[in-house]
Amino acid sequence: MRRACIIGTGAYLPEKVISNDDLAKFVDTSDEWIRERTGIRQRHVAAEGEFTSDLAVAAAKQALQHAAIEVGSIDLIIVATTTPDHTFPACAAAVQRKLGADSAVAFDVQAVCSGFVYALAVANNFIIAGQAHRALVIGSETFSRLLDWNDRSTCVLFGDGAGAVVLNAEDGDGTPSDRGILATHLGSDGRHYDALFVDGGPSSTGTTGHVRMNGREVFRHAVTALVGASEEVLKQTGLQAQDIDWVVPHQANARILNAVAQRLHIDDERMLMTVDHHANTSAASIPLTLAEADAAGRFKRDQLLVMNAMGGGFSWGAALVRW
Ligand code: ACO
């Protein structure tokens, strides 16, 4: 059986850092409130003229270098983003042009904070079907551009960044001992469309709009969805929660992740958390966390990883991967 194996990871965070104290200078908030409720200490913000595709390209180049492969061998590029450079063409087309990845088919996936898991599932299916052999899957966001900097209930939560993985088609036995993506699960529930949304768009207002959120409703659903999606991918493979070496979750906020760890009976040390230094970077947060832990040498061959995410839509999902 074909398996999509992760052979390279990369990440990029813009240079400019905004601390909680910096925010408190122009919004009615405090470092204490933000850290206590979310675990966030700071966020990175893209410079003027620095676009989502630029962040994506920086992360992708690192992933390609790490995988030690030529860009010409990439036949699929999927960018998960909510903040493309332009309404169209796809951000992935800009990334393709900047990388010179002329042999690839390139498109975006829009599932907000679940975007990376959605993109990974799509790329996995292309590889299993034999329609792609080497894919770049990128999560990249300039979420700061969607924020209402007067709304303290949302502007403190988000940041900009990008992360990328290279997937390579390899042969497996079709058992849970294979390396690569073992299972994916995606879910959506449009009944919650207005619990987390942007109040603008090309077809409605002709503007970009700003993030609006019912924080409590998101919190409640996030814990249930992250736990449920993780259990679903375990069930598909017959593996158990105690088999998991690392959870690489969407970095929404530390309290959500602590609640998920508790419900899955996962030790806190196995729940990777980077939200403190880059806040919620939407579709970029999982590959950012993955690349950071990979660069630190935390993942050992054959270890079992669960990535899980939840976001606007609502949308959610998980992927089970053997390293
Ligand atoms: N600084 C200071 N006070 C604040 C701030 C702030 N930044 N934001 C809200 N408050 C105030 C509120 O006005 C309210 O004051 P009041 O009691 O006088 O009315 C008080 O704090 C409590 O507000 P709540 O919204 O009830 O606070 P809560 O404990 O629910 O925490 C939070 C808010 C952190 C947003 C929480 O609901 C949460 O984590 N929700 C999940 C949201 C999330 O992670 N979204 C990310 C996108 S979705 C995703 O990635 C999964």
Image (cartoon, grey):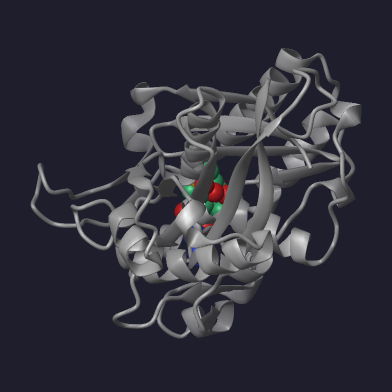
Q: Pinpoint residue 26: horizontal percent, then vertical percent.
A: 40, 82
Residue at left offset 62%, top offset 67%: 65
Q: Is residue 95 above or below residue 121?
A: below
Residue at left offset 18%, top offset 50%: 200
Q: Is residue 53 above or below residue 119?
A: below
Residue at left offset 59%, top offset 51%: 166
Residue 37: quarter of image: bottom right
Say which of 111 and 236 sits in front. Answer: 236
286 lies left or right of 213 = right
Residue 13: quarter of image: bottom right
The answer to whether residue 278 of the structure is visible from this angle is yes
Viewport quadrant of the C terminus: top right
258 lies left or right of 42 = right
Q: Pinpoint residue 272: horizontal percent, then vertical percent.
A: 76, 52
Q: How many numbered dots are placed on residues in this image?
A: 0
The answer to whether residue 37 of the structure is visible from this angle is no
Q: Pinpoint residue 90: horizontal percent, then vertical percent.
A: 26, 51
Viewport quadrant of the N terminus: top right
Say which of 181 and 319 sits in front. Answer: 181
Q: Pinpoint residue 258: horizontal percent, then vertical percent.
A: 76, 45
